[in-house]
Image (cartoon, rainbow, N blue to C red):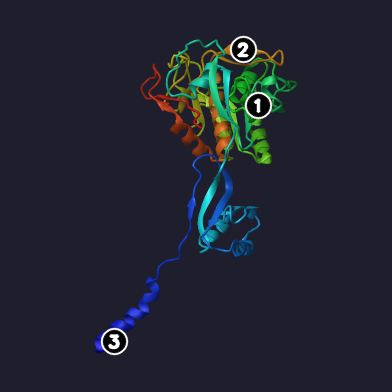
Amino acid sequence: MHFSFAFAALALLVAPALAAPAVTASVHRASGPKKQDHYIIKLNSGVDKKNTIKWLKEHLDSSSGITFDYDSHFLNGFAAKLSPETLEELAKNKDVASIYEENIFSINTVQTNAPWGLQRITQTSKLTSQNANALTYTYNYTDATTPVNVYVLDTGVNTAHVTFEGRATWGYSAISGQNSDGHGHGTHCAGTAVGSLHGVAKDANVIAVKVLSNSGSGSTSQIISGINWTINDCKASGRPCVISMSLGGSKDTTLDAGIQKAIDAGIFVAVAAGNDNTNAQNTSPARVAAAFTVGASTIADARASFSNYGAVVDIFAPGQNVISAWIGSTTATNNISGTSMATPHVAGVAAYLLGQRGAMTPAALSSLIKSLGVSNKLTGIPSGTVNLLLQRGN
């Protein structure tokens, strides 16, 4: 009997430790583009919403707040902006049945006069038409929900061109006495990245950062000056940012370090692999491991004959016979080739994804773009080089 009493006493002592943990409401994550830190909160049946809202207001921090309150017969719940800490507390409230992260819904648009590259990055199979000079291709896109800045570090941008719809601004020139695009290369790249006529991310802002002269060349000091300016401007804007750099040369540790500084500052940097049909490992800034290095493909799904290759190349994108904006008028276009033309396709995809999904780190964005790419579609890819073709995703 004495043993039985002791056992019973022990059981009473440990019982509280074995009590069921508090129930936490499920947080259902958005299945696509989301409204950052915004949630729909559904309460359990029979719960008086007024009491729950009163409780929540007492626990809200400065970055949280109720955004919509619905009629109880319609939805016994409410919408709120919640910090991670407030979300965690609310999920533990016994009145809460479930919490849903808010999705973003947007207008879907179909462009039917697009250049071939835009259709190719939105379908996994080879294009049926092989006319690279036609503007008869289809491009489906959705309006952005997050403003994004794309910095084109190049010869400048024809900011008055109709394709930019007022979204292009002149940012900075590292070339003394030159404050416009007197070459055309930078305008062409900007048009592919964000132009309404030929571009991937049709809502993004483009900022001209002139680091190459009207003859198409620039020195290390000029280019890193442009990078320096871009880092500061991006930080001041508070927006997700992308750099498109369709330039290259011999190995340059100073330039490489400047690129790394931009990436460390949270900016996704797309760089051209180069046009010498050689290993991009021997060129800057293509060899920077954390940069996103882009080779060029053709409408026939082949590596462009001029495109550099090698282990540092992250992806291939349309780069031969690409039509985009040009200088000389507000409607001018040109059809040119190069890894320079492939790079802004990637910059545009980066801006598109940031516009749809919100801010993310350069590493996360790089991984996402690679995961969306389609493998083993290209011919002429040397051993040791990734066979991956750019796809925009949704």
| Disc assigned to residue 222 | 1
The answer to whether 83 is drawn above or below residue 221 in the figure is: below
Residue type marked 3 = Phe
Name the image quarter holding residue 252: top right
Between disc 2 and disc 1, the foreground one is 2
On the question of residue 217 being in view, the answer is no
The residue where tag 2 is placed is 334
The relative height of residue 308 versus residue 207 in the rendered view (above or below) is above
Q: Tell me the residue at 64%/62% (across/down).
A: 57
Nearer the N terminus, badge 3 or badge 1? 3
Residue 213 drawn at (x, y percent) = 67, 19
Q: Amino acid at mark 1?
A: Gln
Q: How far separated are the C-alphas under marks 3 and 1?
A: 86 Å
User: Dot 3: within a 10 Å radius of its alpha carbon, few (fewer than 14), some, or many (20 or more) residues?
Assistant: few
Q: CA distance from mark 2 to mark 1?
A: 27 Å
Residue 148 percent across, percent down from the top left: 62, 35
